[in-house]
Amino acid sequence: MGNIWATTQLFNGLVQLNDKMEVVPSIANRWQVSEDGLVYRFFLRNDVAFHNHELFENGTGRRVVAQDFQYSFKRILDDATLSPGRWIFNAVDLKKQGGFHAVNDSVFEIYLKHSFPPFLGILSMQYCSVVPKEVAEKLGKDFGRKPIGTGAFKFKEWYEGIKLVLHKNENYFETDNTGAKLPYLDAVGVSFIPDPQSIFLEFMKGNFDMLSGLEDGSYTDALITSNGNLQPEMKDDIIMLSQPFLNTEYLGFLLQDTIDGTSNPLNNKLIRQAINYGFDRVKMMRYIRNNIGSAGTHGFLPTGLPGEELRVDGYDYNPRKAKQLLAEAGFPNGKGLPEIPLHTTSQYLDLCEYMQHQLQEVGIKLRIEVNPGATHGAFVANSQVPFFRKSWIADYADAENYLSLFYSKNLTPNGPNYTLFSNINYDLLYEASLATTVDSLRYSYYAQMDSIIVEEAPVVVLYYDQVLRFVHKNVSGLTSNSMNGLSLKTVRKD
């Protein structure tokens, strides 16, 4: 997240997200999408310039033109770049003018192989930032250490592992609603401190202006109450900003008959449903997470996405129903059901132990296996564990990004379908959602897919996360959105 926050200050793309998760203009002031959804045409502003650099004529940042986006996007796909964001252009038709075409300096077109309605949201990602060819190619690998963009702030210096310093871009193109030029701040400093406790102490002393999230539970109670509100004694000095975060925390079941030659009882839907009914998510959130986030009592889709009015109901706490399902599966009161290994990382051990205790009361025994993060990730990606903790943070603000986890053509390790879920009706709905450009119809398809996920239970939704930010009262204008994005261009400090 830190990398994304830094690049947000330094770069711009064709479009951006506002705090309502709507795609709005950035360097492109308007756009058109063909009726078949295959051609995206963007019309660029003529007042956007790169940051000053010695490689530009007279050292002055030149105007951004459509050819810069053509270069920047093809650079992402270049094997030599080794960009982890190549996947964002999977829908682009590279056989048609290379997928990207600068019609002239002010008009830029992108061609898709098939309709993909979330594409505009993808273009708001920082991968899609524009970079200057002459600087990027001259600096090569050093461009990442001396970046030149168009953003509200420009790179000044970086002391690796210690501090990053950004200065105000005096030539920035955006203004506020009164016509005043942005940004307001003269400079931004980013400190790198690995210890969450030290970060908290520096924030409380006033040495840091913002604290994001509560990574270390040891100081959670010092800031917030058990109901997730700011502690009363903090209200004179600190402001808490909070809203839903597009992050679903869940447990996944591996849906295959055998694992290492051993029969997998979790391939039985009744047992998966029993586990979903067998523990109290609401109580879990209250006692373990101070109600930071909301209990996973809906489908896989978190709150905060477009179309959320169609959100479906999920599982509540119903131990009687859990026992009934176990009996129907042939394991009355859990008799004969083998112990189920649940693989997690130490960060989520408390949640897993809570589940272990409650599920034991309905006859389901869990054995918790704790692994380092990298090891755990490899186990999940290679289908080596039957029951595992996972989370999904949205790459872009569209439900498709979540629902793609259950599309049968996205099976791991070549895609994010870690559960190996496969359902013909689900696939047909997923493909239909991509084929329509009518949002209301697409959202209806999304709700139907989410209902299938609830019924088939390839996952246990634990909770939907929450953005938390704490700032001192001398800071104003700081906003947030459900992607946990950070833009400092409208921030003031007294």
Image (tube, rainbow, N blue to C red):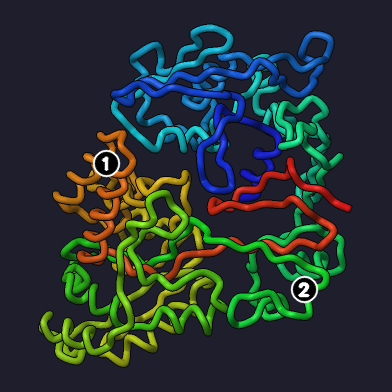
Task: Specify whether residue 365 is in view.
Answer: yes
Q: Position of residue 338 (x, y in %)?
A: 22, 82
Residue at 32%, 51% (x, y): give it: 403
Task: Specify whether residue 263 is in view.
Answer: no
Q: In the depicted view, which residue is nearer to us: 16 or 30? A: 30
SS at circle 2? loop
Gap in angstroms between the C-alphas marked 2 and 1: 46 Å
Q: Amino acid at mark 2?
A: Lys
User: Of callouts 2 and 1, which one flags the residue occurring earlier in the amino acid sequence?
Assistant: 2
Residue at 72%, 26% (x, y): give it: 173
Q: In the depicted view, which residue is nearer to us: 16 or 187? A: 16
Q: Position of residue 157 (x, y in %)?
A: 82, 37
Label at residue 168: none
Q: In the depicted view, which residue is nearer to us: 281 or 326? A: 281
Query: Against 99, is 353 above or below?
Result: below
Residue at 44%, 84% (x, y): give it: 354
Label at residue 235: 2
Relative placement, left or right, of 259 versus 465 is: left
Q: Which residue is mark 1?
A: 433
Query: Against 266, is 423 above or below?
Result: above
Q: Position of residue 213 (x, y in %)?
A: 64, 64
Q: Residues within 10 Å of mark 1 (few under 14, many from 20)?
A: many
Q: Amino acid at mark 1?
A: Ser
Point out the residue furthest to the right here: 494
Relative placement, left or right, of 454 versus 83 is: left
Relative placement, left or right, of 56 versus 78 is: right
Relative placement, left or right, of 329 versus 277 is: left
The image quadrant that residue 382 belongs to is bottom left
Query: Against 366, is 182 above or below?
Result: above
